[in-house]
Image: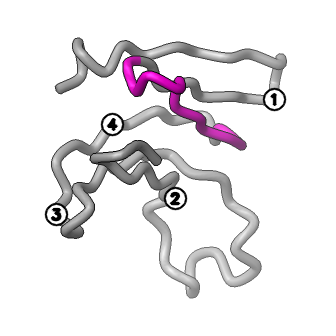
Amino acid sequence: MTDHLIFALYSGKTLTESPTGEDNGSYIIVFTWDGQPILVLQVGNGPQRIAVSEDGRDLYVAYWLPTPLIKRYSMTDLM
């Protein structure tokens, strides 16, 4: 979350497709504080965590499997 945006990790699956809810997200959806989606980023491979830098300029996506990895996305490039 930033002062202007909300970030959500989303699997794209229904509860019927993933009844335990254990599937990790494949998409990051960015919303305004009014609830309007402004960006859908397909990240694939089931990241476990997302974080935004303090200044809101970078988005970090953490994967544990198959090898631990953190990817950085520039919000300027994405928007």
Q: Residues within 10 Å of mark 4 (few under 14, many from 20)?
A: few
The label number, if any, that marks residue 65 in the structure image: 1
**Which residue is labeled 3 in the image?**
36
**Which residue is labeled 2 in the image?**
11
Amino acid carrying label 1: it is: Leu
Mark 3 lies on a secondary structure that is loop
The label number, if any, that marks residue 41 in the structure image: 4
- Ranked by sequence position, the earlier of labels 3 and 2 is 2
User: In the picture provided, is 40 more to the left or to the right than 73?
Assistant: left
* Eye-nearest disc, 4 or 3: 3
How far apart marks 1 and 2 lie (CA) works out to 16 Å
Magenta segment, prevailing SS (helix, strand or loop): loop
* Eye-nearest disc, 4 or 1: 4
Give the magenta range.
47-57
Expressed as whole percent of the image width and height from the top left, the position of residue 17 reads 57, 77
Mark 4 lies on a secondary structure that is strand
Mark 2 lies on a secondary structure that is loop
